[in-house]
Image (spheres, coloured by chain):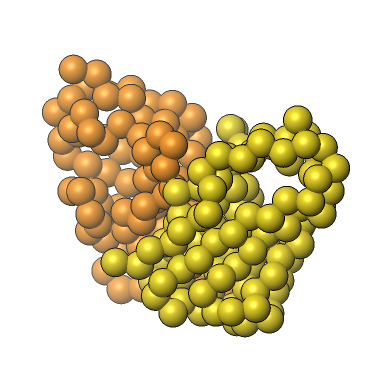
Chain colours: A orange, B yellow
Amino acid sequence: AQSVTQPDIHITVSEGASLELRCNYSYGATPYLFWYVQSPGQGLQLLLKYFSGDTLVQGIKGFEAEFKRSQSSFNLRKPSVHWSDAAEYFCAVGRIYQKVTFGTGTKLQVIP
Amino acid sequence: DVKVTQSSRYLVKRTGEKVFLECVQDMDHENMFWYRQDPGLGLRLIYFSYDVKMKEKGDIPEGYSVSREKKERFSLILESASTNQTSMYLCASSLYRAGYTFGSGTRLTVV
């Protein structure tokens, strides 16, 4: 069965600092991988996705993620965090026409 | 931009009521999904549909049903609402390989 683990429930970073959110997955084949962001009271917005090819994926809002097959990981990074990045972040794995499984989320707090 | 519209942001219903949650997308997407979101549990898939009149059970279909009579509309039905169905419900749609577009969610409270 496919699964996603986001080991950090809550992360606090200072504005301007770098950010890395961890995601590990379990999947029987080459997965499609996604990162979504959710602002309070809102739906989820797609940040980036990986299907194949270059393992470093660029997304919106200055985010990037790296697919590491050997580690079954798809960590999200940003070199310099802005206060507006405070939100909850979800990693997801799956293939189209099959279900997509979401992690339990990581809440990001940004302090001045 | 694709828009996914959920008819209500907030709903309060009584135990035992039949509840309809409506979702409409405006970009001719084939695939539509219903998730519920609870703190600490992330998003859990209730039902999904890859075509009109087609439906598949997700991970937690018990107590729910769905209807997809038209491509743009995917309805979630709580046959007899219970307090453990109090949750945030999120609808999403997608095209092949495009990732999901989510609605803003419906926060349902069952009293």
Q: Residue furthest top?
A: A112
* Residue nearest the viewer, comparing A29 with A108: A108
On-image quarter of the N terminus of chain B: bottom left
**Rendered location of residue A15, percent (x, y):** 18, 25
Instruction: Judge from the rendering whether residue B69 lies leftward or rightward of residue A14; answer left or right.
Output: right
Residue at left 27%, top 44%?
A: A77
Q: Position of residue A112 (x, y in %)?
A: 18, 17
Asked if residue B10 can be seen in this view, the reply is yes
Which one is nearer the viewer's eye here, A90 or A25?
A90
Q: Is residue A17 above or below residue B10?
A: above
How far across and down, in percent of the image, does residue B59 sit? 72, 56
Q: Residue at x 41, y 72 (%)?
A: B26
In the drawing, does residue B84 fall left or right of residue B68? right
Rendered location of residue A71, percent (x, y)? 45, 52
**Nearer to me, B67 or A58:** B67
The residue lying at 22 percent from left, 42 percent from top is: A78
A93 sits to left or right of A16: right
Which quadrant would the C terminus of chain B be assigned to in this image? top right
Residue A93 visible in the displayed image: no
